[in-house]
């Protein structure tokens, strides 16, 4: 298991509308590096609607101009150019995820991570760094 920060989310097109975070379908995952930069490490597998709704209550929108990934584009998967509808959030929620050992050259997990649980007992400063 690995600990990461939830830093953004993707929601299905059917989720457009009323609330900022109605029901995330996947979560974009990050870890801070030793220089203090939030690095993208991967994303979760598709979340059930119940899990997405539960997570939505924990995420807060990132302030305008206040997220290091602002302006980035995230694609739906390998070999596709379809962009995800991403909403960036404050990276202050710690998640425990299950990952395999396969990593890309840049240090990102090659395969989606499986969300295990929200870690309310761990603060962001206790999450291992990107280099670990």
Image (cartoon, helix red, strand yellow):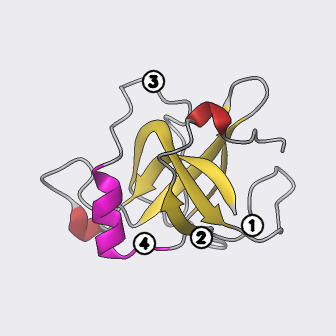
The label on residue 110 is 1
The label on residue 66 is 3
CA separation, marks 2 and 4? 16 Å
**Mark 4 vs mark 3: which is more N-terminal?**
4
CA separation, marks 1 and 4? 18 Å
Figure check: 67 above or below 82: above
CA separation, marks 3 and 1? 27 Å
Mark whose residue sits in front, 2 or 3:
3
The label on residue 129 is none
Residue beneath the point at 23% across and 57% down: 22
Quarter-of-image position of residue 116: bottom right
For the C terminus, which image quadrant?
A: top right
**Mark 1 vs mark 4: which is more N-terminal?**
4
CA separation, marks 2 and 3? 26 Å
The label on residue 77 is 2
Reading the image, the residue beneath label 4 is 47
Instruction: Inspect the magenta stretch and tell me whether residue 55 lies in it.
Output: yes
Q: Main secondary structure of the magenta part?
A: helix
**Mark 2 vs mark 3: which is more N-terminal?**
3
Q: Is residue 59 left or right of residue 91?
A: left
Q: Is residue 83 left or right of residue 122?
A: left
């Amino acid at each position: 298991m690995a600990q990461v920060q939830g830093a953004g989310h993707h929601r299905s097109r059917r989720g457009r509308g009323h609330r900022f975070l109605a029901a995330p379908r996947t979560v974009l995952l990050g870890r801070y590096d030793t220089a203090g930069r939030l690095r993208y490490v991967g994303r979760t597998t598709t979340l059930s609607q119940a899990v997405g709704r539960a997570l939505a209550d924990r995420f807060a929108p990132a302030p305008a101009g206040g997220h290091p990934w602002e302006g980035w584009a995230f694609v739906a998967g390998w070999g596709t150019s379809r962009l995800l509808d991403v909403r960036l959030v404050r990276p202050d929620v710690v998640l425990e995820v299950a990952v395999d050992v396969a990593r890309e050259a840049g240090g990102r997990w090659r395969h989606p991570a499986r969300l295990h649980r929200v870690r309310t007992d761990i603060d962001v400063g206790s999450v291992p760094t990107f280099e670990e």
